[in-house]
Amino acid sequence: MKNNLLSDLNPQQLKAVQTINGPVLIVAGPGSGKTRVITKRIAFLVDSAGRSPGNIAAVTFTNKAAKEMQSRLQELRGPSSHLVTIATFHSFCSSILRRYGGHVGIDNNFVIYDDDDQIRAIKKCMEETGVDPKNFSPRAILSSISNSKSELRDHQSFSSGKSNYFDEIVSRVFERYEEMLFQNGAVDFDDLLLKTHLLFDKNQEIAQIYQQKFEHLMVDEFQDTNVAQYAIAKKISESSRNLCVVGTLISPYIHGEMLT
C-alpha cells in the first residue's frame, strides 16, 4: 500500500506527504497536484503513521473542493475515508455551533442567511434606521459589516473604531442587523466564523475537545484565509502544532517548515 500510495509523487510532493509533525507550509501553484498531496498525506497519516482517521480534518473553501477531496480520499482508502472530517470552513464551524452555540448566545437550531437573505435584511435595517439606499449602497454597507466580522470585530468593536461618516452609518445599520439576526434565530456566514472563534476563546474546555479530536489539521487554499479562519485553525492546532497549510502564496501567518 505504501509503495503504491507514494509511487507517483515527485521528491517535493513526497516530502510534503511524509512531513507529519509540526507546522508545515506547502507552496504550490495551480495545477501542481495540491489536492492529490493533501489526500495522500491523509492516507499516509493513517496507513503509515498509525493515526486514526477520526483525528484528522481538512478544510477548504468551496463545497466542490471538499467533495473532490472526499472523492479522491475514498479512492485511496475506501469507506473508512468518511471518518476523516473534510469540510468547508463554514460547514466545519456550523457543525461546532450546532452543538455548542448556546455558549455564545446562539440557538442550536439557528438558520443561516445566504447572500440574498442578508441583502434583504440590510435593506430592512436601513429603512428602520433612516438610512436612504439612494445615498448609501446596501451592498457596500453589508461588505463593510462582513469585513469587520472577518477581522473578528463585532458591532461593539467596529463602533469604537469608526473614523468617518460612512462608518457612522454602517455602525447604525450593523447594530440593528445584529438585533434582527438574534430575533430571527439566524446567523450569516461571517457569524459562523466569528462565533466559533468567540466560543473557543471564551470556553477553553470546548476548545480542548476539538484540539484533542483533531490531532492533524490541513487547510487548502491558505492564501485565501481571512483573520477569523486562520485564528480558528491556529486555535484547533494549538496543542498538537500539527497544522499543514497549502497555498499559492507565502502567508505571514504561520511559521514552520516550508515545502515548495
Image: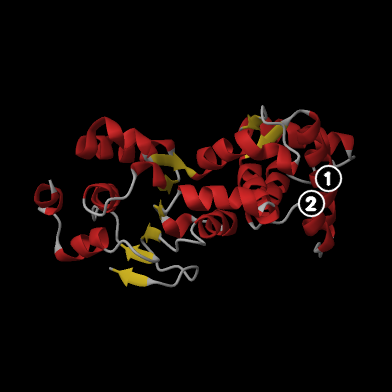
Labels 1 and 2 touching (C-beta < 8 A): yes
**In the picture provided, is 97 more to the left or to the right than 30?**
right
Q: Position of residue 7 (x, y in %)?
A: 10, 53
Give whichever of discs 1 and 2 has the lower sequence position. Answer: 2
Q: Secondary structure at mark 1?
A: helix
Q: Work out whether residue 3 or residue 34 is closer to the camera in this orientation and state it.
A: 3
Crowd class of label 2 (few under 14; some 14 to 19; many from 20; radius 10 Å): many
Q: Position of residue 77 (x, y in %)?
A: 23, 38
* In the depicted structure, whether residue 46 falls above or below residue 110: below
Q: Which residue is mark 1?
A: 175
Where, quadrant-wise, is the N terminus in this rendering? top left
Q: Which residue is mark 2?
A: 155
- Badge 2 amino acid: His
Q: Position of residue 32 (x, y in %)?
A: 24, 56
* In the depicted structure, whether residue 88 falls above or below residue 246: above
Q: Work out whether residue 202 or residue 50 is closer to the camera in this orientation and state it.
A: 50
Q: Position of residue 229 (x, y in %)?
A: 54, 54
- Badge 1 amino acid: Glu
